[in-house]
Amino acid sequence: MKSTTVLTPCPNYIGGDWLTVSDVATTPVHNPSTGDIIAETPMCTPQHVEAAVNAAHAAYPGWWETPPTERARIFFKFKMLLEENFEALAQMVTREHGKTLVESRGDVRRGIEMVEFACGIPSLLMGDILENVARGIDCDAMRQPLGVCVGITPFNFPAMVPLWMYPVALVCGNTFVLKPSEKVPLTAIRIAELLEQSGLPKGVLNIVHGGRDCVDALLKHPKVKAISFVGSTPVAKQIFEIGTKHGKRVQSNGGAKNYILLMPDADVENSVRGVTEAAFGCAGERCMAGSTAIVVGDAAKTVLPTLAEVTRKIQVGPTDRSPQPHMGPVITKQHRDRVCELVDAGIKEGAKVLADGRNVKVDSAPNGFFVGATLLDEVQSSMTVMREEIFGPVLSVMRMDDLNQAIEVANRSAFGNGASIFTRSGKAAREFKHRVKAGMVGINIGVPASMPWFPFNGWDDSFFGDLHMQGKEGVQFFTQLKVTTSRWFSYGEGDIWHREGNR
Amino acid sequence: MKSTTVLTPCPNYIGGDWLTVSDVATTPVHNPSTGDIIAETPMCTPQHVEAAVNAAHAAYPGWWETPPTERARIFFKFKMLLEENFEALAQMVTREHGKTLVESRGDVRRGIEMVEFACGIPSLLMGDILENVARGIDCDAMRQPLGVCVGITPFNFPAMVPLWMYPVALVCGNTFVLKPSEKVPLTAIRIAELLEQSGLPKGVLNIVHGGRDCVDALLKHPKVKAISFVGSTPVAKQIFEIGTKHGKRVQSNGGAKNYILLMPDADVENSVRGVTEAAFGCAGERCMAGSTAIVVGDAAKTVLPTLAEVTRKIQVGPTDRSPQPHMGPVITKQHRDRVCELVDAGIKEGAKVLADGRNVKVDSAPNGFFVGATLLDEVQSSMTVMREEIFGPVLSVMRMDDLNQAIEVANRSAFGNGASIFTRSGKAAREFKHRVKAGMVGINIGVPASMPWFPFNGWDDSFFGDLHMQGKEGVQFFTQLKVTTSRWFSYGEGDIWHREGNR
Amino acid sequence: MKSTTVLTPCPNYIGGDWLTVSDVATTPVHNPSTGDIIAETPMCTPQHVEAAVNAAHAAYPGWWETPPTERARIFFKFKMLLEENFEALAQMVTREHGKTLVESRGDVRRGIEMVEFACGIPSLLMGDILENVARGIDCDAMRQPLGVCVGITPFNFPAMVPLWMYPVALVCGNTFVLKPSEKVPLTAIRIAELLEQSGLPKGVLNIVHGGRDCVDALLKHPKVKAISFVGSTPVAKQIFEIGTKHGKRVQSNGGAKNYILLMPDADVENSVRGVTEAAFGCAGERCMAGSTAIVVGDAAKTVLPTLAEVTRKIQVGPTDRSPQPHMGPVITKQHRDRVCELVDAGIKEGAKVLADGRNVKVDSAPNGFFVGATLLDEVQSSMTVMREEIFGPVLSVMRMDDLNQAIEVANRSAFGNGASIFTRSGKAAREFKHRVKAGMVGINIGVPASMPWFPFNGWDDSFFGDLHMQGKEGVQFFTQLKVTTSRWFSYGEGDIWHREGNR
Amino acid sequence: MKSTTVLTPCPNYIGGDWLTVSDVATTPVHNPSTGDIIAETPMCTPQHVEAAVNAAHAAYPGWWETPPTERARIFFKFKMLLEENFEALAQMVTREHGKTLVESRGDVRRGIEMVEFACGIPSLLMGDILENVARGIDCDAMRQPLGVCVGITPFNFPAMVPLWMYPVALVCGNTFVLKPSEKVPLTAIRIAELLEQSGLPKGVLNIVHGGRDCVDALLKHPKVKAISFVGSTPVAKQIFEIGTKHGKRVQSNGGAKNYILLMPDADVENSVRGVTEAAFGCAGERCMAGSTAIVVGDAAKTVLPTLAEVTRKIQVGPTDRSPQPHMGPVITKQHRDRVCELVDAGIKEGAKVLADGRNVKVDSAPNGFFVGATLLDEVQSSMTVMREEIFGPVLSVMRMDDLNQAIEVANRSAFGNGASIFTRSGKAAREFKHRVKAGMVGINIGVPASMPWFPFNGWDDSFFGDLHMQGKEGVQFFTQLKVTTSRWFSYGEGDIWHREGNR
């Protein structure tokens, strides 16, 4: 794949210095709309990791002793700089990831919301206190930071996912090393520049680029106390295992197969809009993608035809120019091929194609990594498309007779990120909410991703760890309680009470 | 008192318009350093109040329906504008109030901290939910705003006190009418301009100037739901009574007499610094002023001599120019005279003067309202200076034999804002903290005013109401829970579960 | 009215002694099923109040210093004794109040649930702590009890309402004086005996009987710190005003007019059951009674006919024997007459009677205070039955065209206890919940009284104060925060760190 | 070792049945005071585990749907039965474990406190709710139970440790399988009988006895959702790894080396009492044992001599009779030998013996497993006694020059359960609390084990997992949040609002 553009630099950020890395292997960063290479990510070595962790470790004592409100104050500044650079950041996301500008704006906006949340953390850092737990004995539990924390982030939300992690970690008093996806390092770099401009002391945030070697070194480094990870389920599980084995606290988000139930009484227009947005938004490359629609009873007649019609009208195309398409490319050529092969397999196993995006042609961008919106009907649990996470613009339709059966099918999934229902019935919604095995439930909402004030709440194979990102659990993850029990006997030198024989 | 300067305008702010008020009586605003009149505050009528409340009432439905995070977002902008105007605001405070620039910066800084706190309120707005409180029955308690809220603020913290109130009220979803002190309206106006620039919708915040008539109209207006007040105890009590009688929720801060215990084992240098700052900071015009030092046992020998020496070195002078004095004027000529008369009375009743600020001369500003730092020794509980709040730079010293006796004396006070102890003993600190009757306790801290994340926590006659300003109680004050208990029987139109006879 | 039964004694309980009061006026306690006098309540004087408050005041220091878990432990014992005496207590309630045994069991059960809640209070007493609020400065906020608290309770829930109050107050560390309703003092006495048996130290709970003089003395006593009241709105308002004027914290529950919306899609059987239970349970003598049904649109056809039919079948009769009727008598003859007069007025003003309970005859208990279940249709807001709280078995029906109009009518009420909707629509429920002006909302629940873990949450004229009974607010009401800010300078005598010049 | 006593039965408890297990290997249960065998614990097989897990799994749906308050109610009953059997349970603990009766009472009392805590869990099960997170969109987070949970408990607190686990798990709505220590199964059985008597439904709690095979089967069983473990650090780490690898949530408490700092200004009498209690209580067999005293500066002169004197006076002897000794035996003969060997090694490596318990003779109980209280002075970090957890009555003394040095030595430990300081200085206490790396800190408290309302809060190698036992973290461990985002479009069948065109 040729590159005619000037490559964007991709430096590490260590101890407050932006360091160009040479003499290591690199991974190309593409503009997926065109296939062009726009940067080269250095595949850093354990030595680079060592430097980054040491910088974070050196910065920790001073940062810890900085009062929480002073730490937060830097993030107020950061939030403003993010707003000022909002549109440029969205374009940067679109350029290296390929999603539409509207989607990129959402990516950046969700990231900013996490920064806003982080600004309010001092209220959430409070611990508990109770006097006289026994006569004359008091007890309290304060929250203290952990030390050096690490974030390892995926390609699909270049702005948001890093911002899930370090704003919370840092306001809690930790220092941080970020390893962004080697496929989309540029947005992460630009955002870190803005945080630097906001007045963050040197070494509090560090960035090191690379792949598996880097990750391994981070997971095993004795000075690292905690790991936040977002990626696919097999890797997430491994990250959790290696990290915890080496004594680190780990929160590790994996993939998902999210179900959307369409009840016969669902509002057709709104539910079709909700389902298509869930299935095809960001070209299906998100762990909250609604990849399976369960059509219950007569919904096959009332909702499904419109769903097929709307899917077929979704335009795919390059996102780095005007006019914007409905949907952009997937992240790489390899990934495009894999998505198409999974669709092939589904058809071979008996699924019916209501919309087929496999052979989409985009004349204006012949080298882009495009797959069109694809709708498979009559899908069964046993098919490959149901067993594997496709992470592309493919929506599978299953048909069920009633709500009970639909919930049971959804609950058989090993994953547990999201599950939604479209209905007008309060009863159906309550039963679904109560019984469905998923950590994030949507009622007439296609993508029930939590707001930053609530945990991003995967269950089962969608999450490894006990404490999720976002919300109060996020703050808990990046802190540990210290419980103190105290009693005082005598007054010391100036003992002018005891003398009196009082009490 | 002559005015040679151009008067600063003092408009109302109603429904998003800045309205000059004419044909009403006015109250002069002075520069207390010079005695010059710098503005004229219009003494508005109930008609103006009516307009302001109606504007707030009209803006309420739209503001309530604005999501909390969107409401908070305006305050992120506001915080940045306050930072950008920080020095100018401090100068404005000094000009209309007279405190030193260092103190004015503190005033503005504490106000900004409240805005920072308010930005984090979405996390604190969460209510509770519990499913299956009985079989199939769920219960939740959401926080909803109250409607139109009112703030009535005193002269002593022109920036901070209004910012204790409306940022919290507004992010919680209420709309607001502020009546600033007629003695210091200018800072409040300027800060509201900055909030307007931050994008606050019209009518969400309103300002009306005036005196007792205005207050009365606000207290009784049927559309007003809540009143926040800060002032002297007699007025605070009255505000509470009238407000609650008219069905409003009220939080009403009054005055105080705050005690500082100096133990024989106290660190001399630090405790003298703490006590003098507490007593003479802001010329003693604050409800957290440390107006009484209880010298325990040998502290009379170890700490008191240094305290007297330091007090006598405190320079008073004009604050509107360089170089800055240690202490500025009090707010009005009348107040200066009252402070001096209280000192006279104290001496007449037997107190000994260790430092006398009654006849201080300031050549560079002969018309300023100056009282020098005053230290009275051998003060008794029965003296006038102990029974009344002086609100000036006067520190009374009582001598006690032991800690127990000192706590008992402090606990006899009708007030309950602050109480501090200086000691090195963990035991003495614990006993003091456990037993002293004050809502804000200081250990080796002269002015134990709470940070915004904790309530500003007066007890007894220092506060009327149940829910204090600042912190989680502040959020509770400006919201009400709504408890919902729900159960669902049948599925409605699309009843495809029931049909199956499941569960 | 003759009494052939032996009168049950009605002693005060002061400082751990059960004291028979003679030479004061008395008020008769009736068995409302028969009209018989079963006890005489002494109308105690301020002297009795003085003794009770002093006993509580004397017991306070020791009780406060008792660790919360030890205080709670007594209530675990109490809970067990209440269970063991469950049926006897229910019979006692029925005997002095007249409600059915089923309802009396509910009354006792709800009281026990409050005791269960109180046993868990140690977890809820925790305050907040945050270290390094500024460099080297820590802050915490502990919860401390208030001192002597007072409860004044109504006739309608002889077991439950006193148990709303003192279990919470006591586990929080306060001591208490209870003045039960002079109409139903016996259950309160019996329950206090059980608490005494559980090991409560003398003076921690006290009971004094009486009327207005007693209440006045309690409201104004300088040693009393807080008042809990449940009664009618005019008295509740007065209690709040007098109590707060005298420096006490007050929570004061008044009356209500609670609306129940019946939507056309409501499940007929369940909604009729819900509405009739809400309207006629406890003979309508409860502040959560559903006294107005708003029939929306076609619900007039689908639900109303069944409602009328069911109402007409409700049997009223004596509750002190078998078989039990559906509904018992009202509390007094006077009250019966007042209820009937209000119905008369309603009819005169144009309401149509669908069921008429005014002239009910109960042959087996000719002197009981009976009113039959009464259903008035086509009631208008302006009618007397809508403006006044009837507190009897009378259900008014209003007809509205749509949900919006129904909510607006309900929101015009000055009261704000409860409001319910019966529907199958998630949308209708959400809009109702969001917009209705009531503190307790029911969705397909006729009586949305909160469980003890949630506040009993009246709004507007149904509650005076900021902090409700039950739940976390209940604990807040009976405690006050104390905020401590601390810093430490030097080590004192054993200063072996400083010497090293470390930090 | 001969057994002349009748063996106490040791049945499994599965699905509500007490099942005697035959034809498996057994492990002897001793009375450590006499060396007699008092029972034989069956070493159950994976088949028994299968039965227990299946019983728990079958009981889960019904138990989950039981409202939290109903679940808690059973534990109120349980608490009362534990109180009634208090003394008998203490004797049972002493008989199978060997600790003194006073210590056994503490063991049972702490267990009962956990049950008391569990009774209050409904308040702690509440999740969060926030309406209008976006326009018309509401969000909530409910707490739901996990399913089948497992507890694996050690020998040292036969009553308390199982009660750390299942009361919390069960009130949260889970079902449970307990595998008690094969060395002390009898108390656990008896306590479960009491819970059965309290009305717990069949299968909600199950007990299976055994060793490593059992544990393995539990850790890997697909129906098990969570594991609570308490034991030694190497096993705790392994349990965590295997459990999490198999998709379970795990909290796993390991061992510790807890430091106690003795400052020169410490109160001698109280600190010696605190240290000896910490070191020799329960014969040192607890993870909160204070095994190392760091004597700072002159404390070597002021405190150490008394410490040595008191240690030498500690009497060891049989605990199963009167009079009670100060200290009982260790758990087994093997363990006694290991403790003595560690002391030997310490002496060989240079420690000085101030009190020597290796060759203690107890004439009244010649076959008991006794070690006397042992005090080693001049211990260094590098010695075996400092690197390994001794879990016996051995106190090592290190000498340091100042507080800073002492904290640094303590912080080098790989463990992080407890650390205490004895001092009169507020400054020293604050610095220690702030900086020491331990999850439970004591100030003038030898054994800073948390009360049930606070987490039992090990750090580093003393705990594997994120959420500790006890307190709010305990509740979090046994539940998972479910976050629901909801929106409603149209009203459904009874759409009488929309028709009006409102909003």
Image: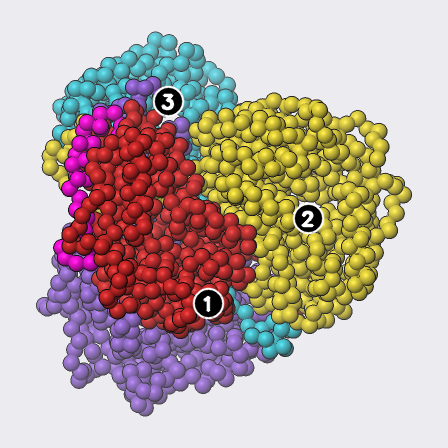
Chain colours: A yellow, B cyan, C purple, D red
In the displayed structure, C45 sits above or below A154; it is below
As drawn, the label of residue B335 is: none
On the picture, is B309 further left or further right than B327? left
CA separation in Å, label 1 and label 2: 43 Å
Q: Position of residue A199 (x, y in %)?
A: 55, 25
| In-front residue for pair D413/D30 | D30
**Magenta highlight on residue D125:** no
For the point 63% across and 40% down, the residue is: A153
In the displayed structure, D415 sits above or below A272; it is above
For the point 68% across and 48% down, the residue is: A286
Report crowding for label 2: few under 14, some 14 to 19, many 20 or more residues within 10 A (C-alpha).
many
Q: Which residue is mark 2?
A: A286
Q: Which residue is mark 1?
A: D48
For the point 29% across and 26% down, the residue is: D400
Q: Position of residue A484 (x, y in %)?
A: 33, 40
**In front of the other: label 3 or label 1?**
1
* Quadrant including the N terminus of chain A: top right
